[in-house]
Image (cartoon, helix red, strand yellow):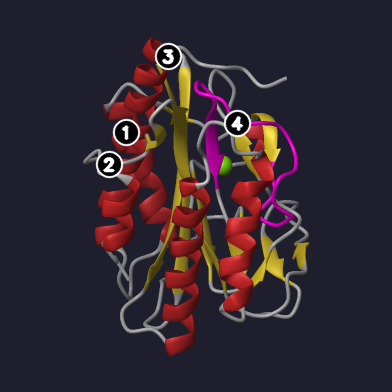
Amino acid sequence: MVILKSPSEIEKMRQSNVIVAEILEILRRKVQPGVDTLTLNNIAEKLALARNARPAFKGYRGFPYSLCASVNQQVVHGFPSRHPLKEGDILSMDFGIFHDGYYGDAAVTVPVGKVSELARHLIQITREALFLGIEQAVPGNRLSDISHAIQSHVEAAGLSVVRKFVGHGIGKALHEDPQIPNYGKPGMGIRLKPGMVLAIEPMVNAGGYEVKTLQDGWTTVTEDGSLSAHFEHTVAITEDGPVILSTTDGESVNAQRGTNPV
Ligand code: MG
């Protein structure tokens, strides 16, 4: 069942998601060769607690950390570690918090120093795919219009969309209905309505779409060892279209697409 949110609930969700966005932005600026991801995890945790927010992932189904830190061929749910990042790596950071009754959730992939052309392409296309998906989050569209926009852009760029993990509704729970695949034919699934709040999160591989989960039960990597990128925003659907909640500056979808952090 999809839970619709009132305007005052969406305002609270904006506050939760702004906390996530602020922290991810601080982490993004700290990413450079020599930094390790456990340090980033600890910074994220401290910053969340200082904002009266509880890191949402720590303890979620037993996940042991606050930040998902996935390097290179790691797709999602990577464990932060003391292993230093090195020039040419790419790092996906997925972070979520719980604040005043509501969850926030967002993810970003950042280059570590100078990266390969392929890595830059992967990051750019994945981010563009997220925004093309968000543009479809308008009342009257069907859920899979989001999925299709993402898949079309990714595959036209010679990359592939991960099937095993999907976006999700979000609110008083971290994961609510509906599930949002990043692939599919347009015009399918539920009709989108004002009040829906969706975490849209394409995961894109440079090689094939197959992934596998490692022995630790969490870390998911590409089957063929190719690089993977992940971007996520929490988005409210309103009468006027999609509003990105997980942003620090309240920019519109189009304004955000125009800025390229890569
Ligand atoms: Mg998510």
Amino acid type, callout 2: Glu
Is label 1 in a helix, a strand or a loop?
A: helix
Residue range (magenta): 180-200
Is label 2 in a helix, a strand or a loop?
A: helix
Lower sequence index among marks 1 and 3: 3
Q: How many marks?
A: 4
Residue ID for mark 4: 192
Residue 172 can be seen, yes or no? yes
Q: How far across and how far down the image is residue 253, in percent? A: 35, 48
Say if mark 2 contacts mark 1, CB within 8 Å. yes
Distance from disc 1 to disc 3, alpha carbons, whole Å, reads 16 Å
Amino acid type, callout 4: Leu
Distance from disc 2 to disc 1, alpha carbons, whole Å, reads 5 Å
Instruction: Examine the rendered structure and indicate whether residue 38 appears above or below residue 260.
Output: above
Is label 3 in a helix, a strand or a loop?
A: helix
Viewport quadrant of the C terminus: bottom left
Residue ID for mark 1: 19
Q: Quadrant of ligand 1?
A: top right
Say if mark 3 contacts mark 4, CB within 8 Å. no
Lower sequence index among marks 3 and 4: 3
The verdict on residue 79 being magenta is no
Between circles 3 and 4, the one closer to the viewer is: 4
Between 176 and 155, the one nearer to me in the picture = 155
Task: Note whether ligand 1 is within 8 Å of mark 2.
Answer: no
At 54% from the left edge and 45% from the top edge, which residue is drawn? 200
Q: How far across and how far down the image is residue 158, in percent? A: 61, 81
Lower sequence index among marks 4 and 2: 2
Distance from disc 2 to disc 3, alpha carbons, whole Å, reads 20 Å
The answer to which image quadrant residue 2 occupies is top right
